[in-house]
Image: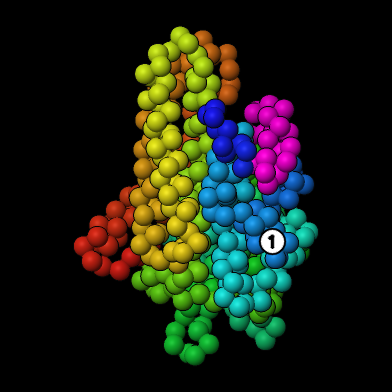
Amino acid sequence: MSFLQRERMALEQFFPGLDKALADILLDDLESPGSPGIELLRQAGGVGLVIPVEFKGKGASALDAVRVQRALGARSPSLAVASTMHHFSVSSLVLLAANGGKEWLLLEAVAANDMLVASGFAEGRPDGRILAPTMDATVVPEGVRVSGLKRPCSLARSMDLLTASLRLPAPDGSGDRLAVALIPAKDPGVTVSPFWSSFALAGAESDQVRIDNVLVPEALVVLTEVTDEGRLDSIQTAGFVWFELLMSASYLGAASALVEQLVDVDQVSETERLQLISRLEGAAAGIENIARQVPDSVTDSRLLVDTLLVRYAVQDAIAAVVPKAVELLGGLRFMTANDIGYLSAAVHGLGFHPPSRGRMAGPLTRYFAGSPLEIV
């Protein structure tokens, strides 16, 4: 089996023809503003990847999903990152629906109508507290009035719905609770403006979204059990596991695209080639090990801890492999092929997604000393 063949087989299984369609487009075009990648994914039914078949989705397992994301990352890092934000948002709704909630109605609408769901959490801020509310909310008889700003927000220009974190009074009067609101992108109070100025990952549509006094019906507001100390309920835990898995696989795919160019280069020694391949495949094995545990343990805080450790290990593998791959590809190819320079820059994005290793060093160390897990 050739390098990345397993991942591309998974992509072909769920979205026939998509890999070829992406491969036929220049990377420069896929990674630029206005990239055709997001629309190609939508047309292929990509919004339904992790939505169960009974809700009109593709029914991919976590293992299937990480392989698909790695394959996408190897073709277009921007598309892989943007679609991860959608799957992260949808995965929590899947768990709520499995627990008897009415979220299945929304999941069916998303899958049947190829709707993209953007995330209004602390994406892109290495010092951001991902659980901190990003919007102001006021409870009114009709639901909740929401205002605020999210930047950057991937899928900003293609989204149909935006998930946003809120702080709302608990129904029993016991204080405040964190909640997640689903905001229709076509609401007149939702505006999008330019924000992302970096050339890296420009195809992910990570622009600024402003929410101005938007009324969100009560049916589109989900309360969570997260405490002020950063402790997680089962829904939030599952969401974090999915986010870290899919994002790690996406950036691993981008790094894999560089190494793939070296696999059959005879001028580079087999030992050097194998060293790079083994580092990436070892990282992939860590991701897949977590993914295989998702069906039984996705709400377990210990699995989230393991997921975070694997995510940071993936960062380390990418940091070790990419510079060496660029060196072995040679200066002439670096100077004459934009793909090499671009991919070597784009892969660093994994470290910018929360929760950062620096912020989690204390909580994880305390966890292994016996304290409950906190996310900061």
Toward the bottom, the furthest residue is 172
Say which residue label 1 marks: 53
The residue under label 1 is which amino acid type?
Val
Report the front residue among 213 and 133. 133
The x, y position of residue 16, in whole percent, is 73, 41
For the C terminus, the image quarter is: bottom left
From the viewer's perspective, tell me whether residue 178 is left or right of residue 79.
left
The answer, for residue 121, to whether it is visible in the render is: yes
Residue 11 picture location, percent across and down = 64, 41
Q: Answer with left or right where residue 139 lies relative to residue 353.
A: right
Depth check, front residue: 307 or 295: 295
118 versus 179 height, above or below: above
> Does the magenta-highlighted stretch encompass residue 108?
no
Magenta span covers which residues?
11-38
Name the spot of residue 7 as percent of width and height, x first: 57, 38
Q: Quadrant of the N terminus?
A: top right
Give the secondary structure at mark 1: helix
- Residue at 39 percent of width and 32 percent of height: 279
Which residue is pictured at 50% across the width and 14% down the height?
A: 265
**Front-lying residue, 11 or 118:** 11
